[in-house]
Image (spheres, rainbow, N blue to C red):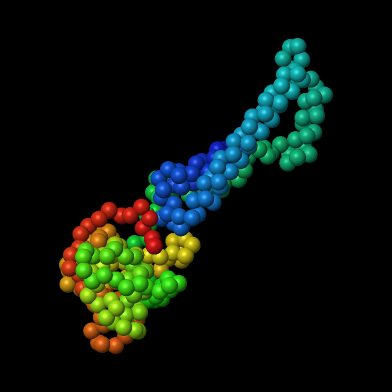
Amino acid sequence: MTRSAQNLLLMTVGAAVLWITLGSGEYVNYVKPGFRYLLAPAGAALIALGAAGLRREWRENTAHEDAAREGAGHDGTVRHDEARGAAAHDGGHGHGHDHSRGPRVAWLLCLPVLAIFVVAPPALGSFTASRGAGRAAPPPAPPAQGFGPLPRTGGPIAMTMGEFIGRSYEAQTGDPASFTGVPVRLTGFVTPREGGGWQVTRLKMACCAGDAIPFPVIVRGLPRPPADSWVQVDGTWLPPTSGKAETGVHELRGSSVRRVAKPKNPYE
């Protein structure tokens, strides 16, 4: 790989980072939205470094061409003393090897660029959620002022999966009446359950997709839509049928479900 190719590849990587950050917005499939303010300058810096490397190499090539023209005789041949100097230079630096080229393995750097432009991996879905089903997500911490009371009349209240699980945990360990009968609306993707039934799930990440944990809510009383499809589910909280607190299990008695488009940010 020549130095020109290395610099062009560096610029391509920077362009890919800028594209998923400022163009398509797909960076939220991998990191939290706040990382936009780090990714955009990093992509711009890669492009600037690659451009600087190309400019430097162009200037060096131009200087070598000028030196070659100045060193040529009137008949177009290079003077013997300069030819001997060039040979001595090659003999003392790698015996004629071209140091302007990098190892061939450097071409592997093209793979992440192709992955971004051609087969960009989507956001995590039901496969990841099912693999993490054995470790129940801890209930999210309530707001500093605690969860406020909810109206019991009117349309369903849209809430995050984290808030639903937090209120479910409080209702199981405290006063069930605080959440019973309140119509809610949850948005997430469909995750099949072992043994039948399904869950509406949303993944929450602290930093990037690698540390994402699932926030699943079991849906009762509604047919299962296709796995990984995004849905809005209306219903009410369902207390544990055993009558005992099951703080790792959160259920919804569904009243309706409809397919929706995947949100711009698929994580909570």
Residue at coordinates 75% horizontally, 11% vertically from top-left?
A: 74
Task: Report the front residue among 228 and 263.
Answer: 263
Is the residue 187 above or below the residue 197 in the image?
Answer: above
Residue occupying image coordinates x 26% and y 70%: 151
- Residue drawn at point x = 39 percent, y = 49 percent: 119
Residue 197 in view of the camera: no
Q: Is residue 181 left or right of residue 264?
A: left
Could you tell whether 222 is left or right of 113 in the image? left
Residue 28 image offset from top left, x and y in percent = 42, 54
At 40% from the left and 45% from the top, the residue drawn is 24
Which part of the image, by quadrant, shows the C terminus? bottom left
Is 102 positioned to the left or the right of 20 in the image? right
Q: Position of residue 153 (x, y in %)?
A: 21, 69
Looking at the picture, does residue 164 appear above or below residue 104?
Answer: below
Number of numbered discs visible in the structure rendering:
0
Is residue 132 in view?
yes
Q: Quadrant of the N terminus?
A: top right
Task: Find residue 182 and report its horizontal and vertical position in percent.
Answer: 24, 72
Q: Nearer the viewer, residue 130 or 85?
A: 130
Left or right relative to 224: residue 55: right
Q: Quadrant of residue 19?
A: top left
User: Quadrant of the rendered structure where residue 253 is?
Assistant: bottom left
